[in-house]
Image (cartoon, rainbow, N blue to C red):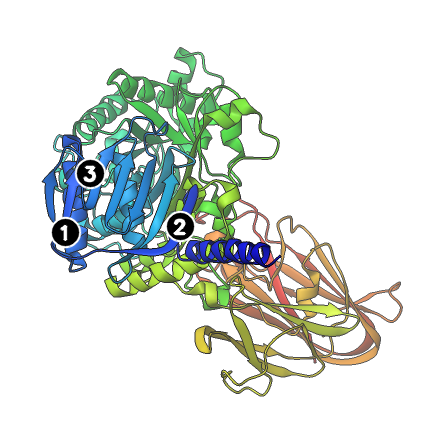
Amino acid sequence: MKLLLTTLAIVYLSLFMSLQAQEQVRVIPYPAEVTMQAETCKLKSGQKIHYLDASLYKEAAFLEKKLADLNYKMKVIPSKKAAKGINLSLDDRLQNKEGYQLIIAPKQVLIKGGSPAGVFYGIQTLLQQLTNGDLRCGTIEDAPRYEWRGYMLDEARHFSGEKRVKQILDLMAYYKMNRFHWHLTDAQGWRIEIKQYPKLATIGGEGCHSDPDTPAQYYTQEQIRDIIAYAKERHIEIIPEIDMPAHSNAALAAYPMLACPVVDKFIGVLPGLGGNHADIIYCAGNENVYHFLQDVLDEVMALFPSRYIHLGGDEAWKTHWKQCPLCQKRIREEKLADEEDLQGYFMRRMSKYVQSKGREVMGWDELTQSQIPDDAIIFGWRGMGEAALKAARQGHRFVMTPARVMYLIRYQGPQWFEPYTYFGNNTLKDIYSYEPVGPTWNDGIKSLLMGVQGSMWTEFCNRTSDVEYMLFPRLAAVAEVGWTIPGKKDWSRFLKALDHFTERLAVKGVNFAQSMYNIQHSVTVRNGKLQVTLDCIRPDVEIAYTLDGGEPTVNSPRYVKPLIVKQSTLLKCATFYNGRRMGKTLTLPVCLNKATACTVYTDSPAKDVLVNGVRGSSRSSDFEWASWENNDTICITLDLGKKTRMQKLIMGFNNSYGMGIHKPRRMEVWVSPDDRQYRKIKEQSFTETEIFRQGMFTEDVQFDLKDESRYVRIVAYGAGMNPPTHVRPEQTTKVCIDEIIIE
């Protein structure tokens, strides 16, 4: 019996030590198989880096430099067999060429790869594991889930420059990401030198979305060659994007003769979101356009050795094509059905040219709206990337970068704390939890999925630090989605590794977001009372709060369940980790009035926010706004519970010009004692100038009532379509309302 107990104790101790050891594996993305021991290997200056294959010299030299940056001076030498120190070798038994095996013993480190890329990824894992010269002994066997682990940077709208791009490439390599999709041209800027057409850069590179007077900013061909070489050393392939036929205003500013001859408005580099000038695109009927683009692509392909060339193909408005005699002639000659098919012709023709040069073509999922170019690879971005499945069913490979979860320009935390951007949230957890494979996909579709990509658009980035803020640490989550199989993902484990990584970002001076520590609130109506729910995406923090307006401290009460608010209150709360303050203070005024917590009847699912005592911010997607897409008639009825004396009614509206959100054109207030017979007591109307104002702000509309009743009905009539000069011309306006206040 004693022997049995001793044996069990040893087994349990061994298991415990093994689990403890695995907790020390701070690797992003997380490996496929990890077997670690409690022992450690000590790296010291003077040790050697052996490369057992001549093709691995660059990887050995890379490791030497990285260790030197950490004050470990090691010498690189060729060897025929493994020896003491660090050993790099190839192993053709590894089925995945990007796979690797990392074996750490007390006196020897072995990194075996299926290719030099695999060895390089093993090096990244080693570097991530290194702490004060210590490496925990054990074995890591690893390979990526997907071949495409991508990141897209939009430099047309915000120009980052060579130094910052290289820094991003370094961090991509750290996360074993291998595709850099470089969005170099758009309506807001042309960022690549084309020697045959110099004005593309010197004129098309002028200005940016935030400042039309910015001098021309672009990459020379020599700079591009240097960046490509830098990326190659890190096993990153750079894929250039030359957008067509739309997003071409910067090119047309330089060479306006390539636009449709019927264009009668300003042709230039567009600031901001572009407005109604974004409908100026390349003329599909002008033969010179195709010759021009072929010349451009010739220089691009001479610069970029990439297997792939991205041709865009998204968001092409056909306004001028419909009126252009050249485009209409092309439709007739090519026996095309309409302008949509004309874009299909345009993209197929340019795709065939690229393919004739031995390259593969990529494009956005709008290419599925007509005949898809042969063998084109489709990037699924709209919604959850559903259009890419349409392409897959026709046998096309595809990459998933759905805007709703993989667009890094969206808010990454509670919006009350975040800089202005657009749309809703893509939090760190949202991205980490993303599963690109749909539950109903068959094996054929699964086999055509190349991988995933995080896409960074820069419409709201005025500084490079803004790009960094939106990118980090979410890029780490993108990397793990692309590399790690779902069964190996663990949110809590990822956060622990991420904390280690953000410490390194801080040392490097990178402006990363700490949004994961901020608090998201929800104030709901429950049985005539207000219930406040607080949440943070990190499960390892505590939320401390005050109700007296004081700043939360480590000694403040802890949030453990929803709070019931019975009177006007100033709630303040913040997160704490191991006694240390994290994130920002959420300051939440909950202000009660005669309408607060009353019963609301309307067709918006978010109706309770209208009477929850919390005012929405200027960010229309902050979860405090009730919204209507179809706003011909909006009807909201309040049941105040009893006959109530009313002096004023105040309604808050959101105005977000870029998103086409505006207040209604007319509003009416009706009252009733019994919810049967209503009488109109007030009315207000607004002009187009008052409605379609630029900017992002909130605005109150007030009615002086001086009446007494139980039921109040607000009827609002939307403004209809945005005017032709709007940034979103001829799209239906959206109405966002919060809060309804009765005094």
Q: Is residue 54 above or below residue 162?
A: above
State how many labels appear: 3
Return the disc, 1 or 3, that comes first in the chain's sequence.
Answer: 1
Residue placed at 49% from the left, 30% from the top?
Answer: 388
Where in the figure is residue 316, as x and y percent of width and height? Answer: 41, 34
Is residue 189 among the parts visible in the rendering? no
- Separation of marks 1 and 3 at Cα, in angstroms: 13 Å
Return the disc, 2 or 1, that comes first in the chain's sequence.
Answer: 2
Q: Which residue is mark 2?
A: 36
Q: Amino acid at mark 3?
A: Ala
Q: Which residue is mark 3?
A: 82
Q: Amino acid at mark 2?
A: Met
Where in the figure is residue 19, as x and y percent of width and height? Answer: 48, 55
- Separation of marks 2 and 1 at Cα, in angstroms: 23 Å
Question: Which SS class for mark 3?
Answer: loop
Where in the figure is residue 214, as x and y percent of width and height? Answer: 21, 55
Q: Which residue is mark 1?
A: 47
Is residue 199 among the parts visible in the rendering? yes
- Separation of marks 3 and 2 at Cα, in angstroms: 21 Å
